[in-house]
Image (cartoon, rainbow, N blue to C red):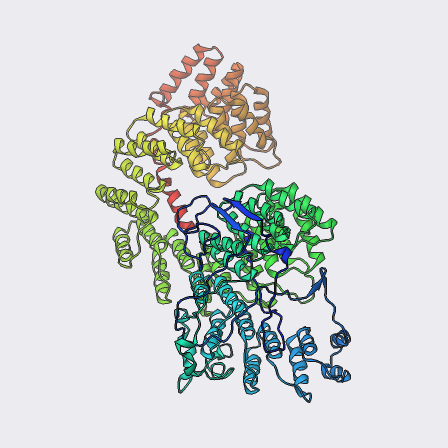
């Protein structure tokens, strides 16, 4: 959730300082902010976790103890009057004298205010500040105000400068003035400015100068330095300042302690933060567990090692910046140890946030209870932190109750309060409540901030709540607010997911015109299009107009555009874009090469992938293991195993460790090519390297054992797979079914198949393998049952699955069902493949289609003649009696404006003739003659069929005469067609005469229409080669 990155951070660097020797000012809460003597604040169970040893509000319990892990309801009762606590504790030798005892009980805000308005400076200060803001020459401006400035006025001028350069120039001018006395407050302002700008070398020089001038650092100094170093990401260096304090004998006050705890909390060092806080409470500062001695103690070394400017704390800073501590003052009798209690609201806020983030909810509850008991004023941050802690741990009712208590105490929720609730409700899936939080922000007199809009748009876009997004955008436009750049990709992705491409384009163009978009944002938008395969739209964003002249495309944009081309299989476009990157000022990075290589390997463009792999290595990039495995898998898939082994060896040489995917690809490649020993050797090498075999590897090994005919080895692997995480997968089970099928073990295969079916895992491969097994064993009824179930299960999704079921029906002579499946394929726009046509030609032969016509169609199909495929489909529909579909299919080529060969005309004549449309059949024959195509044997056979169907005996006699007198070469199929035609015309006498003539001519019996044994074998083996296609697809993807 976007709002989860938000954390409450408290900055204490703006603490007000005084030029007097006492740097900490006492701040007393007004009486109205304290509970009245007779008031009793009682909260029931708004935190549903236990508070260990919290007996009552009157019982002192400090420091906070670890809470019991057992959850139970909580009643917190806090008495209004403050109990006096015994601050004396046992004497503890802490190693250095406590020089600072802070009495500060509240943290002033950065800008003092009166009645809610910012305090204005009086006297000459406004004129000086205006002049400094408008003038470049700082020294000239300050010289013009030659009047004496008080130290307080000097401090104001320093603080109000906008850059570290101006701060240092103003400070140098002050130091150049006669009578100027350096003081710690001015140095603190300068050090803070340099630290915030991360000018570490300048900070070091300032620190050294401060020591030379005899100005001693105070708690304010150390707290500020810890803060700026931590915010620069130098957590360890920031904590070195606490070590410096300890060596100088300065004990951290509450604000400094708070800063250290916050730094450790933000770094995720929750236990150390807790330990530092509790040590502080009893007067200790122990940093040994922070492992800082290795850095800090180097100051005592004779020869210090060279260090960077960021780590100068180990040299000058530990030699300067304070008086050398006198051990004589460290006698235990001189040290008065007191149990300290926090008095600042900000400290309690930090502690609550610390324990909440650490998951120590009981401790967070104890801090909150102690805050109530101690009478420390709560603020909005306190409640916001508690609300987030409760809600993020599933205690939404307590979070809501906290909001009520917050308002009862006169503390108004701010925008962040609503943001937290918005986030919590969204995470809980309560979108309606989340949206109510958004709309209630304005009802409460507040204004949504950028975090609010980012969060609500993210929530809505993620769930494709189009209308609600439009409402939020409309409201933002009404108030003149712009959509944050980080929200643009999510909104555009929502439009794309909803198919609203026009809106996506318009929104992008509008956003682009309102301000410059970063390369990262553009890349995210391109990626949203790429994920949906919309490469043209992605291309428009990529090549679109840039806001500023010279704004070049970033490498991330190139990478996602290459991805878009890859998903669309536009490999040439992707490679062309890659080659042009350098000319446009963007150099390909590691991700570019990895993506391209994997893309080409996935598309079986192995030579291009190998060339890019070599180029990547020359460029000094180290390919990912996934990149090597993609190339290896591609070579293995293409059967080029020597090249695959070569890439594997190269992978090892460059220091990339092969994983199970690499070994799995090699093992599968060896298994497919029958190199059983190489596959087993590869497996042994994998086990020796300590890599555990996964499902894919073991499935490949099952295939290896199948090649060996080793049933026991395969069964052992199959049993081993049951013990893997995730158990058996569908590919392994299918492999075992196939092995049992090859061995003719029907009952064993059926047992695995039934198990898959009960689990709902059986897929097309499972059904096809069982059909293959039953057909081989002559169990045609069982094969048909499996085919029917496969069809009813909706597993017919591609040509391969249709082919397997059609082959089963064809073997069993169920030709009508074959025609129905063919029509379903055509309707679903599945283009029949070679396997489909293999089945269709068998259907034609079994259906009584003249063998000469079948041979003619096969020849046309193999030669790729126009409409040859459509002619075959038409013939099948006619043979199985689906005449309406046959005529519909026929007319697609009969009316085409292309030159057809005689085979296409013959099919049209046959289709029209057997469906009873004799006129169309004869017209087709006349059109054939007009095209100067001579009638062939198949033409005569089909004409005879038409004449017989129409009872046109004279037409049959004419063709028979041509056959009898040698004008047509004698042919058994033509004789049979003439006999059938006479029978259809009720001229059995003539049919008998032709039958006798045919016997006399061929001296043989009429041929059988049965399919040959070889053709039946072809049908039975049709699906066998496709059994492992699914596994190969998985391997290639990996």
- Of all residues shown, which one is farthest toward the bottom? 178
43 on left or right of 161 = left
Q: Residue at x 52, y 65 (%)?
A: 258
Q: Residue at x 52, y 67 (%)?
A: 254
Q: Residue at x 36, y 35 (%)?
A: 766
Percent coordinates x, y for residue 205 in the rendering: 56, 83
731 on left or right of 819 = left
Q: Is residue 548 above or below residue 936?
A: below
| Residue sitting nearer the eye, 566 or 884 | 566
Q: Is residue 494 above or below residue 198?
A: above
Percent coordinates x, y for residue 221 in the rendering: 55, 75
Percent coordinates x, y for residue 557 in the rendering: 58, 59
- Quarter-wise, where is residue 580 in the image? bottom right
| Residue sitting nearer the eye, 654 or 946 | 654
272 on left or right of 934 = left
Q: Is residue 521 above or below residue 827?
A: below
Q: How many marks?
A: 0
| Residue sitting nearer the eye, 509 or 819 | 509
Percent coordinates x, y for residue 845 in the rendering: 41, 28
């Amino acid at each position: 959730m976007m709002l989860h990155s938000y954390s409450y951070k408290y900055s204490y660097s703006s603490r007000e300082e005084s030029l007097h020797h006492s740097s900490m000012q006492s701040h007393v809460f007004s009486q109205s902010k304290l509970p009245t003597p007779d008031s009793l604040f009682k909260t029931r169970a708004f935190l549903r976790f236990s508070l260990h040893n919290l007996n009552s509000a009157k019982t002192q319990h400090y420091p906070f103890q670890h809470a019991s892990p057992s959850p139970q309801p909580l009643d917190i009762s806090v008495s209004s009057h403050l109990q006096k606590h015994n601050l004396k504790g046992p004497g503890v030798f802490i190693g250095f004298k406590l020089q600072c005892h802070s009495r500060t009980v509240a943290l002033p805000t950065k800008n003092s205010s009166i009645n809610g308005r910012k305090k204005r400076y009086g006297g000459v200060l406004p004129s000086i500040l205006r002049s400094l803001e408008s003038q470049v020459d700082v020294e000239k401006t300050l010289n013009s105000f030659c009047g004496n400035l008080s130290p307080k006025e000097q401090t104001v001028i320093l603080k109000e400068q906008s850059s570290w350069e101006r701060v240092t120039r103003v400070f140098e001018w002050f130091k150049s003035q006669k009578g100027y006395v350096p003081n710690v407050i001015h140095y603190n302002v300068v050090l803070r400015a340099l630290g915030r700008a991360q000018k570490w070398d300048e900070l070091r020089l300032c620190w050294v100068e401060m020591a030379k001038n005899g100005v001693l650092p105070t708690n304010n100094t150390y707290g500020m330095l810890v803060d700026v170093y931590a915010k620069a990401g130098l957590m360890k260096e920031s904590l070195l300042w606490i070590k410096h304090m300890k060596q100088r004998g300065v004990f951290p006050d509450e604000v400094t302690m708070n800063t250290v705890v916050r730094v450790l909390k933000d770094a995720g060092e929750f236990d150390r933060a807790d330990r530092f806080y509790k040590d502080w409470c009893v007067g200790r500062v122990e940093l040994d567990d922070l492992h800082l001695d290795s850095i800090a103690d180097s100051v005592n070394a004779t020869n210090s090692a060279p260090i960077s400017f960021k780590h100068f704390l180990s040299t000058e800073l530990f030699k300067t910046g304070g008086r050398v501590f006198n051990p004589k003052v460290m006698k235990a009798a001189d040290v008065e140890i007191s149990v300290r209690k926090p008095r600042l609201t900000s400290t309690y806020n930090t502690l609550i946030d610390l324990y909440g983030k650490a998951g120590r909810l009981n401790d967070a509850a104890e801090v909150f209870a102690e805050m109530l008991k101690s009478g420390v004023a709560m603020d909005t941050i306190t409640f916001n932190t508690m609300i987030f802690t409760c809600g993020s741990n599933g205690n939404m009712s307590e979070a809501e109750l906290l909001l009520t208590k917050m308002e009862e105490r006169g503390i108004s929720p701010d925008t962040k309060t609503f943001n937290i609730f918005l986030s919590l409700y969204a995470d809980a899936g309560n979108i309606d409540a989340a949206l109510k939080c958004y709309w209630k922000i304005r009802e409460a007199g507040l204004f949504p901030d950028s975090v609010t809009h980012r969060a609500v748009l993210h929530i809505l876009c993620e769930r494709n709540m189009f209308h609600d997004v439009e409402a939020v955008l409309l409201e933002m436009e009404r108030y003149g607010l712009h959509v944050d750049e980080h929200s643009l990709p999510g909104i555009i992705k929502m439009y794309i997911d909803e198919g609203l491409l026009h809106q996506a384009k318009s929104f992008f163009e509008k956003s682009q015109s309102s301000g410059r978009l970063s390369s990262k944002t553009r890349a995210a938008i391109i990626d949203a299009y790429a994920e949906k395969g919309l490469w043209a739209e992605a291309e428009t964003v990529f090549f679109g107009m840039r806001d500023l002249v010279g704004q070049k495309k970033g490498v991330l944009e190139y990478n996602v555009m290459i991805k878009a081309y890859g998903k669309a299989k536009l490999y040439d476009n992707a490679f062309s874009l890659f080659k042009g990157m350098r000319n446009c000022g963007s150099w390909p990075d590691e991700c570019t090469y990895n993506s391209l290589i994997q893309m080409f390997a996935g598309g079986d463009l192995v030579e291009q992938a190998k060339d890019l792999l070599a180029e990547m290595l020359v460029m000094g990039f180290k390919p990912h293991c996934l990149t090597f495995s993609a190339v290896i898998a591609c070579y293995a898939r293409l059967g080029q195993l020597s090249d695959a082994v070569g890439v594997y060896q190269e992978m090892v040489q460059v220091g990339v460790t092969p994983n199970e995917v690499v070994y799995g690809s090699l093992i599968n490649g060896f298994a497919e090519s029958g190199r059983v020993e190489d596959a087993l050797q590869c497996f042994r090498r994998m086990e020796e390297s300590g890599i555990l075999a996964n499902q894919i590897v073991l499935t490949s090994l099952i295939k290896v054992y199948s090649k060996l005919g080793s049933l026991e080895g395969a069964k052992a692997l199959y049993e081993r797979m049951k013990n893997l995480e995730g158990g058996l997968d569908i590919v392994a089970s299918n492999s075992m079914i196939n092995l049992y099928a090859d061995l003719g073990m029907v009952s064993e295969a059926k047992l695995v198949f039934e198990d898959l079916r009960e689990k709902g895992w059986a897929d097309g491969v499972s059904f096809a393998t069982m059909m293959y097994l039953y057909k081989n064993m002559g169990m045609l009824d069982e094969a048909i049952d499996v085919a029917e179930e496969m069809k009813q299960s909706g597993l017919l999704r591609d040509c391969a699955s249709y082919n397997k079921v059609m082959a089963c029906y064809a073997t069993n002579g169920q030709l009508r069902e074959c025609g129905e499946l063919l029509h379903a394929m055509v309707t679903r726009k599945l283009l029949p493949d070679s396997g489909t046509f293999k089945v269709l030609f068998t259907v034609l032969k079994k259906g009584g289609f003249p063998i000469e016509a079948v041979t003619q169609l096969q020849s046309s199909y193999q030669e790729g003649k126009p409409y040859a495929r459509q002619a075959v489909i038409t013939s099948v529909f006619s043979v199985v009696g689906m005449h309406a579909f046959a005529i519909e299919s026929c007319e697609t080529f009969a009316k085409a404006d292309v030159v057809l060969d005689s085979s296409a005309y013959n099919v049209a004549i046959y289709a029209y003739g057997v469906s009873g449309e004799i006129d169309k059949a004869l017209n087709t024959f006349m059109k054939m003659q007009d095209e100067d195509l001579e009638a062939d044997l198949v033409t005569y056979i089909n004409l005879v069929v038409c004449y017989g169907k129409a009872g046109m005996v004279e037409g049959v006699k004419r063709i028979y005469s041509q056959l009898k007198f040698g004008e047509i070469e004698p042919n058994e199929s033509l004789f049979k067609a003439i006999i059938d035609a006479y029978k259809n015309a009720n001229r059995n006498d003539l049919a008998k005469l032709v039958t006798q003539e045919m016997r006399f001519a061929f001296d043989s019996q009429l041929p059988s229409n049965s399919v040959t044994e070889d053709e039946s074998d072809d049908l039975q083996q049709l699906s066998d080669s496709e059994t492992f296609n699914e596994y190969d697809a998985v391997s290639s993807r990996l």
